[in-house]
Image (cartoon, helix red, strand yellow):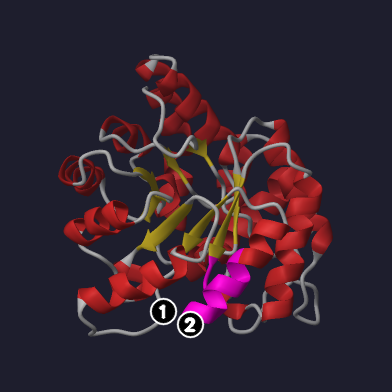
């Protein structure tokens, strides 16, 4: 694989937010997860995205989670921080907080406004990016957020801003191939979808993946094997984790609820309490999650 435009690549697992019985951030499982991720060779860390349940976190809780991840990482791997504030001023302010906490690059979420012209969304992102002195990506996931840019809009944003270097998408391998072709390599693509289709996402030209935080070691195996040209090994590792990927991909809430259970079992720790509101684990679902966790080995 060739070098990336942003300088960032590989597996950046999204850190789950773990909660105590009172709904606050439980730092012990967050610290354990970050340490395990670094031990198993992740290429970076991501925090405060949809799989961090950012929409359930107060501003103070977002900062607490960010600072916990950053302190545990201690600069060992690059940290990507999603900025989910709903205004230009809010995003600019939180971008500076993230930078000061150790972020190496940012992912801007669009504001929760639907049925607006693409030009308005471009103006929103431009107003933020103009005031940010880090490499910037945007989260382009209209199927989850209800709003996003076209491939032409992404290309225009890259032409306006030299530091717009990443699109964080949730697309199929076919959609990623089209995006890479139509945007002419102006920025890197990191896909999500829990690692779904990872080998083909890489074949399509993605620079990396930002999956959930429960099976990062297997994604590292897939990515590293693919990067050194051993596609057979990449496919074999992907087949090992695919049943869990399929189980978790029902919805974001399903992913975080059961993903944290899988992670806790693999780490041998209590993953904490479920915040309100949350998908409730059923006995059947929990048994399935445990079975998938045991098939992947402990961390």
- The mark found on residue 111 in the picture is 1
Q: Residues within 10 Å of mark 2 (few under 14, many from 20)?
A: some
Q: Is residue 263 magenta?
A: no
Q: Judge left or right: residue 247 versus residue 36.
A: left
Q: Residues within 10 Å of mark 1 (few under 14, many from 20)?
A: some
Q: Which residue is mark 2?
A: 87
Cα–Cα gap, marks 2 and 1? 7 Å
Residue located at (35% from left, 45% from top) = 189
The mark closer to the camera, 2 or 1, is 2
* Image-quadrant location for residue 287: bottom right
Q: Is residue 208 above or below residue 51?
A: above
Q: Secondary structure at mark 2?
A: loop
Q: Judge left or right: residue 186 versus residue 209.
A: left
Magenta segment: 83-95
Q: Position of residue 210 (x, y in %)?
A: 48, 48
* Image-quadrant location for residue 274: bottom right
């Amino acid at each position: 694989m060739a070098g990336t435009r942003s300088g960032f690549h590989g597996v950046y697992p999204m850190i789950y937010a773990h909660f105590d019985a009172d709904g606050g951030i439980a730092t012990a499982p967050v610290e354990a997860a970050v340490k395990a991720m670094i031990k198993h060779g992740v290429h970076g860390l991501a925090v405060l995205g949809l799989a961090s349940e950012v929409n359930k976190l107060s501003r103070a809780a977002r900062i607490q989670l960010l600072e916990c991840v950053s302190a545990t990482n201690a600069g060992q791997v690059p940290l990507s921080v999603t900025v989910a504030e709903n205004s230009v001023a809010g995003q600019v302010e939180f971008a500076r907080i993230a930078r000061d906490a150790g972020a190496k690059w940012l992912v801007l979420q669009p504001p929760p406004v639907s049925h607006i012209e693409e030009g308005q969304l471009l103006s929103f992102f431009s107003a933020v990016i103009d005031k940010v002195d880090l490499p910037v990506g945007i989260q382009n996931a209209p199927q989850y957020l209800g709003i996003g840019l076209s491939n032409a809009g992404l290309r225009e944003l890259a032409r306006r801003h030299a530091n717009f270097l990443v699109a964080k998408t949730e697309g199929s391998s076919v959609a990623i191939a089209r995006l890479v072709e139509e945007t002419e390599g102006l920025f890197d693509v990191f896909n999500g979808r829990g690692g779904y289709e990872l080998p083909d996402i890489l074949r399509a030209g993605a620079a990396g993946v930002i999956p959930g935080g429960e099976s990062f070691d297997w994604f590292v195996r897939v990515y590293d094997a693919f990067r050194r040209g051993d596609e057979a090994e990449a496919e074999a590792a992907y087949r090992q984790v695919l049943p869990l990927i399929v189980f978790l991909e029902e919805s974001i809430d399903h992913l975080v609820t059961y993903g944290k259970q899988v992670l806790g079992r693999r780490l041998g720790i209590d993953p904490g309490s479920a915040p309100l509101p949350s998908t409730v684990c059923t006995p059947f679902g929990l048994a399935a999650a445990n079975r998938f966790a045991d098939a992947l080995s402990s961390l």
